[in-house]
Image (spheres, helix red, strand yellow):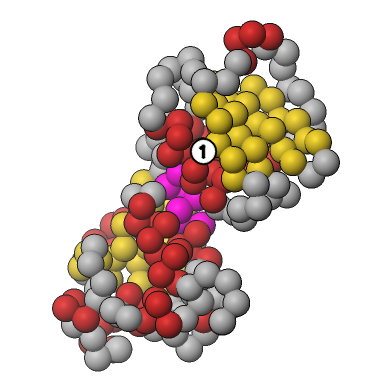
Amino acid sequence: MKKITTGRLRVSGDQAAPTQTIDVKGKACPIPVVKTAKAMREMSAGQVLEVFATDPGVEPDMHAWSKQTGNELISIDQDAGVFRILLRKV
Amino acid sequence: MSDDGDASVLYVMTHGKESPERCATPFFLAASAAAMDADVSIYFTMNGPQLLQKGVAEQIGPKGENGEKLSFFIEQALDCGVKLLVCQPSLDLNDLTQQDLIDGVRMIGGAAFNDMAMEADAVITF
């Protein structure tokens, strides 16, 4: 079983500058994943999506989502209950 | 299971409007799976087709008067590409016809259902 990692998974420098941001703070499962999937469909390969969420399940969900879709989970950071997730479209 | 979007999940819903607390979960799990690029269907049997009757989804919700109505969860699932399926005997059991159901519900038979179950990567029953 994959270990759930907190904090930055990979240092990507400027490559991780987001091209789009979605805010799903206060939204419960499955909305963060559903909105992420929708936003990513509109993006081009290599572009980075930034997601702000407060759903406590969002961390394992984003790991699962990226594993199944093949999109890269660059990092998950948490600050005062708000998760900031960076994903790169493949 | 492949990682290129070919995974498929079949949900089976057997509960109807007698248990509103059970009504939303198959829809939001299916929506999650569809957001993961899986091919996702929900098959409604036994009491399940009651949830697809026109007007019902606006009346009930998993938390009663608090929280979202079932219609919210159905629309979310459809928006994600989840397919809704029923079979004729299940409709007849509930004295329903396809005309009584919301738009977008597809009619299949027992053989098609079993074929989907055999082909699916996962079958999850509620």
Q: Residue at x 68, y 9 (%)?
A: A13
Mark 1, secondary structure of its residue:
helix
Main SS of the magenta part reads helix
Q: Quadrant of residue B10?
A: bottom left
Left or right placement of residue B30 versus residue A65 in this view: left
Left or right placement of residue B67 versus residue B11 in this view: right
Q: Residue at x 72, y 17 (%)?
A: A10
Residue B70 higher or lower than B37, as above or below: below
Q: Is residue B100 visible?
A: yes
Q: Which residues are magenta?
A: B29-35
Query: For the image shown, how many numbered marks are present on the structure?
Result: 1
Most extreme residue toward the top is A14
Is residue A27 on the magenta stretch? no
Q: Horizontal and vertical percent for residue A81? A: 79, 44
Which residue occupies the foreground of this view, A78 or B98? A78
Left or right placement of residue B24 versus residue B85 in this view: right
Q: Which residue is mark 1?
A: A36
Q: Chain of mark 1?
A: A
Q: Is residue B119 visible?
A: no
Q: Horizontal and vertical percent for residue B91? A: 25, 82
